[in-house]
Image: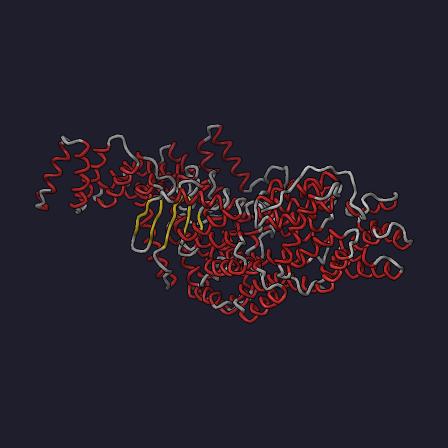
Amino acid sequence: MKPAFLLGLALAVPLPGCAQEPSDASLGSALEAYQTGAYETAVEGYRSLARSGADLPLSARGWALSLAATGEYDEAIEALDEVERQGGDVIELSRVRGTVLRRVGRRAEAEARLRAAVDSTASDGELARIELAELLFDSGRRDEAIEIFDGFIDFYNGSNGLDAPHLSAVGRALTVLGTRDPDLFHDAVRAFEEAIEVDPGDPDAKVHLGALFLDKYDSPNAGQLIDAALARNPNHAAGLLAKARRAKFEGSSAAIELTEESLAANPALTEARAFLARLYLELEDPVSAETEARRALETDPSSLEAWTELAAIAHFRGDAPAFASARDEVLSVNPNHSTLYEALAEVAYRTHRYADAVQFAQQAIDIDPISWSAMATLGLNQLRLGQLDTGRETLETAFAGDPFNVWVKNTLDMLDELSVFEQTRTERFVFSMHPDEIGLLSAYASPLAEEAFAAMSARYRYEPPTPISVEIFDRHADFSVRTVGLAGIGALGVSFGSVLAMDSPGARTGGEFNWGSTLWHEISHAFTLGYTEHRVPRWLSEGLAVLDERHARPGWGSDVDPGFLAAFNEDRLPSLERFNYGFVRPQYPGQVQHSYFMASLLCQMIEETRGFDAILALLQAHKEGLETPEAVMRALGTDLESLDGELSDYIRTEYGSAIAALGEAEPDQPPAPGTFPAIMMDGARAAADGRTDEAIETFERAREAFPQYAGPDAPALLLARLYRETGQLDLAATRYREYAALNENHFDARVELADVEAELGNAAGLQSALEGAMWVNPYGPDLHTRLAGSYEETGDWGRSARERSALLALAPTDLAEAHYRLAYAHFRGGDPELARKSVLSALEIAPNYEEALDLLLEIRGRTGDDR
């Protein structure tokens, strides 16, 4: 039976043998300097006291810990040696010595010192006991460690008036025990809160509690506590690292900068070095990652975190001997270190190797069956492989063990929504959609997906495993949870390989995105991921996906914007050596979108200058495990720096005139005369004043200056509307078509173009414009009716049937007529069986529907079928 954990005790009596308050102002001043991060001042104050023999052992402990706070571990040990040589109590200094020895990887010595403090009842023996338990736990001696952690419950219940460090020790013990009993996490929170109440000036308890909240997915509360600790001590290395971890949790680009701040405060903080290595590895920068991991080992050669990162780096590189060596280093320190495999699973997921993530997560669970975080990682990645039933079962087990995991909870809720989805199959795809949308969307998505597969299998000379599962979510929150476990990501689609997920057009505001190009984009990822066995770097996969969009339809794929050209001109775009940083750790608003466009230009340049075989050679090199510099050299015959120069020249050739036309923007100053922004302002004033001819002439000059601009105020669109207003329909149609070939998302422009094409009597143009509009917003019955009618006029009964089917899926008021119209299209298109089914549906609703009865007789006359 779990012992009762009694809280709310009186907090007045100090623990026997442990000094609670400083004995004089000098010790108090040193403590204040230590707690506020003025470590040099703290060292001076504590050292002066210790050397004079005053306030021992507190002054000696403070001296050593102040040195250790900035990574001066050798100096901290020397300080303790000096005090002991002067007659200081070895036992009273054993706990601090053990703490510092543990920091530099001298584990056996650390354990001996910590045991001495515990066994000899030093005044800080309980603090030594929590350090000892954590050391044992990290060394794989979990049963012994758990027994010690359990003892802190009795310690708390049997003590009155614990000080902040001892209350924090209780909280640390309960945090570990909470893995086995989640209720104890609540008790851990209360212990840390009591520690904060006892000593509001001590930032350590706030950092511990913030880390606990973050571990339990409560980022807002974690942030408040961590920020409060750093407000008190801006040089608190562990606090800065906790803030960096929270930034990573939030997907913020500040994670690297904050980790570097932590290392500036304590360059020898191995946890921060290892975390920085992880951040670099997730950016697919194994060189920088390895540098940081090995720097961590310079401080602590036995660092589990550092060796774990080296194992992950070796796996990323496909270096089996290096992987085995790093793995064995970890397991030699802690044979039960399930976190090794959990970390490997996390890195595998972040670098798109989902099958590897499943394998590693299972290995973590084999070592520690109650590693609920590893269980969650396993379940989430099973889902990414399309193993929905198995993944759900795994996640239910994980959530039972850790009911705080909001990612798991959200995912289980999402799976409940997904369970009501209906499926439709094509030769190579299985689509899952909400019942209210599948009838409409599948009519478009199914043929487009098969078209994409055929085009890309010819282009890449490769076919990914089929069937490819495509989940199209009617709510963006569900898609977001399917992707990362949390609502709120900005992406439109994601590819896990042969499992794709994306927003439906109804999941976003109408006209916000092109769902056809999104589907094409994600199918491209299925090809490049499969081709390289999930080793393709992000920049290459994204660049090819956008380029593949451009090959699919005019206007599809990212378009250039003034912000990109300004960033290029100001040298703010990342070098190819650090290309992935722009996707994952953007340094300015819009850099993610700019990175997609830049990557597509690079791939486009390579295809144009070297042929698509060079792209295939680049993919093959990555499949074989080459890193980007080596892959580029082998496939393209150049180095990254030279390729960078080629790309800059290519961009200047393509957009040099536009860059010049944009000019140099000056803050709080109007644009320079003659620049694109100034010309656009002149045109807008002329249009507003009714000077239409002048506005047209001015916007034509703007269009010539920056013809690729595709924004909602693009000259091409403004001109199209002005030409239409003045009755110049041919010119209007030309500019509308031009704009549609630049901007894939503008719904109204396509409808306006369709109107102009209709006035010109251009049925093919009308059909093309409305087809494009359907990939932005397919929910308008009037447009489907109009498009169906146009196809019927031109004798394209197959497409007419598609549009009549779409209208039926939109649940029109007159269902009988909708079924009849569909039946007529099927019949005229040469499919009497489908026609018969549809006309019978019409007659079930309206048995005396004369036109439907006539059509049924005509069908029977043709087929001889009296049904």
Q: Is residue 495 visible?
A: no
Q: Which residue is farthest bottom?
A: 321
Q: Is residue 380 left or right of residue 737?
A: right
The furthest residue to the top: 689
User: How has the structure been colored for display?
Assistant: secondary structure
Q: Nearer the viewer, residue 77 or 625?
A: 77
Q: Quick one: 806 or 227, which is closer to the camera?
A: 227
Give above or below for 759 relative to 467. above
Residue at the farthest front position: 1
In the rendered image, residue 193, in percent from the top left (x then y), is placed at 68, 40
Relative depth, front residue between 449 and 297: 297
Rendered location of residue 671, percent (x, y): 59, 39
Q: Is residue 158 left or right of residue 611?
A: right
| 427 lies above or below 3 | below
In the depicted structure, whether residue 831 falls above or below residue 812: below
Question: Which residue is drawn at the image coordinates 66% and 47% (left, top)?
Answer: 153
Q: Position of residue 632 (x, y in %)?
A: 52, 66
Q: Quadrant of the C terminus?
A: top left
**Numbered circles on residues, count:** 0
The reply to whether residue 355 is in sight is: yes
Q: Nearer the viewer, residue 664 or 698?
A: 664
Q: Quadrant of residue 563?
A: top right
At horizontal 25% and vertical 39% (from top left) the residue drawn is: 804
Residue 227 lies, in percent from the top left, at 68, 42
